[in-house]
Image (cartoon, coloured by chain):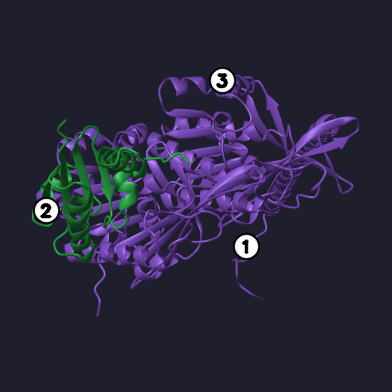
Amino acid sequence: MLNITKAPTGIAGLDEITGGGLPRGRTTLLVGGSGSGKTILALQFLVNGAQEHGEPGIFVAFEETPARIVGNADTFGWNLDQLQQGKQLYFMDAQPAPDLVQSGTFDLSGMLAALGAKAEEMGAKRIVFDALDIVLALLSDPAAQRREIYRLHAWLLAHEMTGVVTLKADGNGQPFGFMQFMVDCAVILNHTVVLGVSQRNLRVQKYRGSSFDENESPFLIGRSGFEVAVTRTLGRGRAEVTNERVSSGVARLDTMLGGGYYRDASVLITGFPGTAKTTLSGAFAEAACARGERTMFVSFDSDSNEVIRNLGSVGIQLDRFVDNGTLHMVSARTITGSAETYLVRIKTLAKEHRARCVVVDPVSTLSKTGNELTAHSVAERLIDWSKAEGITLVCTSLLDEMSSQSEAGSPLQISTLADTWIHLNYLVQAGERNRGMSIIKSRGTAHSNQVRELILSDSGITVTDAYTAGGEVLMGTMRWEKESAERHAAEMAAVTARLRNVKLEAEQAELEARVKLLQVELAAKVTEQAVLARSAEAHERELALGRDRMRELRGSDAAPEPAGVTR
Amino acid sequence: MKPDVFSFRLYIAGDAPNSLQAIANLAQLCETHLPDRHEIEIVDVLLEPKRALTESIFLTPTLVTDSPYPGHRIVGTLSHTEPILQILGLGVAQRRAFAGLKERDSAPQLRRPD
C-alpha cells in the first residue's frame, strides 16, 4: 500500500481541506488565472516549510525576477531576506532572457542539473516551479512540452522533493491538461467577479491516495498571506458544550432567558431600523467587558466613535473599556471586498484580540455585497467558527421593512442557525411607536414567550411587561395609563380593606366587652346563689336549735331520740 | 585586417540527443563560415552543475558567445543556422558583401554593360 505522508502548507484552511498538506515527495499542480494568487500560495508553502518544519525550499521563478517576488511578498511579513541568508530559501531566476535566440529544440536538463546541485547543497525538501508555462511555451510542439514535463516529474521523484508547479490557465482551456493526469495532486485557483464583487475560490481537483474536501472553498489573500475559508469538515472536533451562562447586559432579559445566553451561543437580534438592535448588542458588550472578557465589536454601519457616542446616550459607556484594551471596536466600513473578506478579517481580528465575545452589527450587511449565496455560507461559517472557538457571538440583522413584517426570518436565513433569536419590533398604537421585544427561540433554555416592552433611557435599557387588554398588547402611554388606572384601583381597594378592618376590630371589641359584662353578671348570680344556699342552711340550723330549746323548756323527759334509731 | 576570432561556449547535458546535435551543428557551422576564426569550449552541466547555476544556464543546449562584443545566448540544437549567423553579424547581406568583394578582387568586371 502506498503510504502518503503530507507536507503541511501551514496555510490556514488548506491543510484542513487536504487533510494535512500536500503529498510529500510528490508533485502538486497549482492552476489558476492571472492574479489568482498562485505565486503567493506557492511561496507561502516554502516559507512555512522553512520556518515551521525545517524544510528548506527552492523557488524557481520563470516569470518574475526574484527581487520582485520578494518585494511583493514583503507586505506579508515573511522575513524572506532572513530566510535567504539562513540558506532556508533560495530563489532561482530562471526567466528566459527577452532577447533569447532559439535555434532548434532544447530541454530543461541544465536547470535540473543546477537545481540538483543547489538542492543537495542546502538540503532542500520543497521546491516550487512558478509559471512553468512560460518556459513550456518556448518549446516548439506539444510532444516536446510533454517530454519536459515528464523530465521534471521524474527529477522531482528522484530527488524526493515535495514539488509545486504553477501553471496559468487562461479562459476555459487548461493548456497543459495532460499534466493534471500526471501529478498526484491538483489545486485550482479561481478568481471571479460576481455582480461586481470579487470572489476567490480554491478547489482541490484531485489528490491521489487521500481524501479531501472536494468543494470550492473561498479564500482570501490577507495581511499575512493566504487564508482559505473552510466549511465544516467532518471529524473536526467541536469545542465542548458548556452550560455556562453569560449576561445579556439587561437584567430582565437574562431572567427571560432563564439566566442569560449560553457561553458558546450565537445570538441573533433581528429588527427593523431603529428598534435598538445596536443598543441591545452594546449592552451585551458592556456586560462582557465589565466581566473582564475581551470583546470585539464590529460595526458595519457606523464609525467606532459614533457607536460609542450613541451608546453613551443610553447609559452604555464603552469608551472606558476601549481605553483599557478590553474592547476592540472595529469599523468594518474600512474593509472592502467580498463577504469572504469580511469573515476572514473578522476572524483574524478576533484572533489578534483574543476575543471571547464578538458582536457583529449588523451581519445582514454581508448579503449586500452582491452575492447572496456566498453571504449565507459566510454567515454560516461565522457561526460555526464562533462555536468552535467557544466565542459568544451576538449578531444583529436588519429586516427589510417591506419584505418581512411578520418576522419571516432574516435575509441570510441564519435564524435557523442561531441558538437564540431575539426579535425587536415596533408597535404603532394610539399615535405612538413603541419597541417590543420577544424571544422567538432560545435553544436549550426555558424562556418567556411574552412580548415585552423595551424602554431606552439615559440610564440604560429596561424591559417591562407589556399589558394585554382584550387580546391586544399595550405599550407606551397606553400602558402607562392602564398602569396608573390599576394603581388607583389598587389604592382604593387597600383603603376599603383598611376601613373594614377597623370596623371589624370595633365590633370585636364590643363583643368582648359584652362578654366581660356577662361574666361579671354570672359571677354575681353564682355568689347570690351561694349566699342563698348558705342562708337557707342557717335557717334550718336555727330551726333545729329552736326545737331542742323548746323541748328543754317544756321539760320533756322524753329522751331525745338517738339519731339513726328507727322506730 | 585580421578578422575577429569568435569564442563560443556550449553548455550541454551529458550525451542527450539535443546536446550531441548541438555539438555537431556548431562544429559544422564553424567549419563552413568561420574556418580558423573560432574557439569552442564545451561545458557539461551534469558534470559541472554549479557552473550552470552561477552562469544561469537553465536550458540545454545553450550556446554563449563572449566575443566579439556584445555577447549572445542561443538556445537549442543550433539546427537553424541562419538566425545564428545573423546574430553573429554573419547574415546573408554581410556574406554577400564579403563574397562580392572577393569576386570583385578576382574578376574586376562585375557588371557587363551591354
Residue type pointed to by label 2: Glu
Q: Which chain is displayed in purple in the rendered image?
A: A
Residue type pointed to by label 3: Asn
Q: Are marks 2 and 1 on the same chain?
A: yes
Classed neighbour count for the residue bearing mark 3: other residues with Cα under 10 Å, few (<14), some (14–19), many (≥20): some
Tell me what hue chain B is rendered in: green
Task: Say whether disc 3 or disc 1 marks the residue closer to the N-terminus.
Answer: 3
Q: Chain of mark 1?
A: A
On the image, which quarter does residue A314 sit in?
top right
Task: Say whether disc 2 or disc 3 marks the residue closer to the N-terminus.
Answer: 2
Write down the residue under mark 1: A560
**Label 3 secondary element:** helix
Write down the residue under mark 2: A120
Q: Chain of mark 3?
A: A
Classed neighbour count for the residue bearing mark 2: other residues with Cα under 10 Å, few (<14), some (14–19), many (≥20): few
Q: Which is closer to the viewer, label 3 or label 1?
A: 3
Tell which of A318 and A450 is nearer to you: A318
- What is the spatial separation of the Cα atoms under label 2 and label 1, in whole angstroms? 164 Å
Residue at 48%, 34% (x, y): give it. A296
* Residue A280 shown left or right of residue B22 in the figure: right
